[in-house]
Image (cartoon, helix red, strand yellow):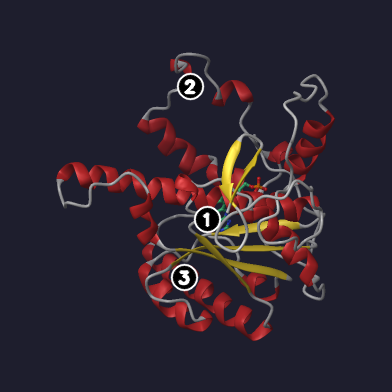
Amino acid sequence: MFITFSGETTMSANTSPSASPSASASPSPSPNASASANPTDERPDYSDTRRYEALMDVIGRRMTVRAFDPDYVVPREHHERILEAARHGPSGANSQPWHFIVVTDPELKKNIADYFREEQRARAKLKMKFPTPDYRGLATAPGFIVVVSDFRWVKAFPVLNDGSELDRMYHENAERILLQSVAAATMSAHLAAAALGYNVWWVTAIGQEYAQKAMKPLLGIPQELAVLDIMCFGPPAKPAYKRWKKSLDEIVSWNRFDPSQFKTDAQIDEWVANSRHKVMYRDASNVD
Ligand SMILES: Cc1cc2nc3c(=O)[nH]c(=O)nc-3n(C[C@H](O)[C@H](O)[C@H](O)COP(=O)(O)O)c2cc1C
């Protein structure tokens, strides 16, 4: 059955996505309830910035920490609220190519954390000079969500699937679409965690094939799927600090790319050598 809602035609319950006019703040509304909808054509008051300020407050306070209070237990309802935010994320072709595994078993967390320690050790031998963080905090992170995707979903995006060079280019872009989609949903989850007052940790260091192979059986993840990252959250072990962010002028051009913001290879190398470790591990006021 089809229903018309806010100018869009959607399929209703049982078969596929439906929409409910009621806004819901509860963590587990009916699976396809709409979080917000404006059933009239009335425009909002664009000069009213209160919701923007509230959102910016959450965005500004989202801060990474790499160690959490190990004794804190995240209520199931908070996990659900956080993943409810992810569920509403945009995605290429509305394919929603994501899956989230909530890990609450301390033994599992510890086993996963062991792979990161291994990665840390492997990297040290490779002499990449990357200032690898301390991953011990993973083992006791109160909130622990493994973000999984299935790259076969690139088929949902514009691809030729004929093995041609053109197809290769479209596939490359399709992978970008997939990654952007999962990142968009993941970011919503991080912001929801920040809105609940938690600090967050976005961990990607396990993308390598060998780490994936080793880790997937632990969580029963089919080989076809990929672990993209882990989202940890909870109260911080030590107070969080705000990291350095580029100014708006540095990251925005109007109409045409501002050439003064173009970085040469040498400038990037210099930044990697002299600034990267500071912006990763110091607060913004402490980055010279
Ligand atoms: C895509 C992505 C990958 C990241 N990967 C890691 C990671 O593997 N390990 C880690 O400790 N932090 C990781 N981070 C966290 C960043 O280091 C952190 O966001 C950055 O230093 C800025 O700090 P902030 O989050 O407090 O603004 C990642 C963040 C993003 C968005």
Please state the total of marks drawn on the protein image: 3
Q: What mark, if any, has residue 261 been given in the picture? A: 2
Relative to 84, is 251 on the left or the right? left
Q: Residue furthest bottom?
A: 107
The picture quadrant where one finds residue 284 is top right
Location of the C terminus (image quadrant): top right
First in sequence, mark 1 or 2: give its number: 1
First in sequence, mark 3 or 1: give its number: 3
Residue of label 3: 119
* Residue 104 rendering spot, x and y as whole percentages: 69, 78
Foreground residue among 260 and 158: 158
Q: Secondary structure at mark 1?
A: loop
Relative to 284, is 151 on the left or the right? left
Residue of label 1: 131
**Callout 1–callout 2 Cβ contact below 8 Å:** no
Q: Is mark 1 within 8 Å of ligand 1?
A: no
Q: Residues within 10 Å of mark 3 (few under 14, many from 20)?
A: some
Q: Residue at x 38, y 28 (%)?
A: 264
Q: Amino acid at mark 2?
A: Gln
Foreground residue among 138 and 175: 175
Badge nearest the viewer, 3 or 1: 3
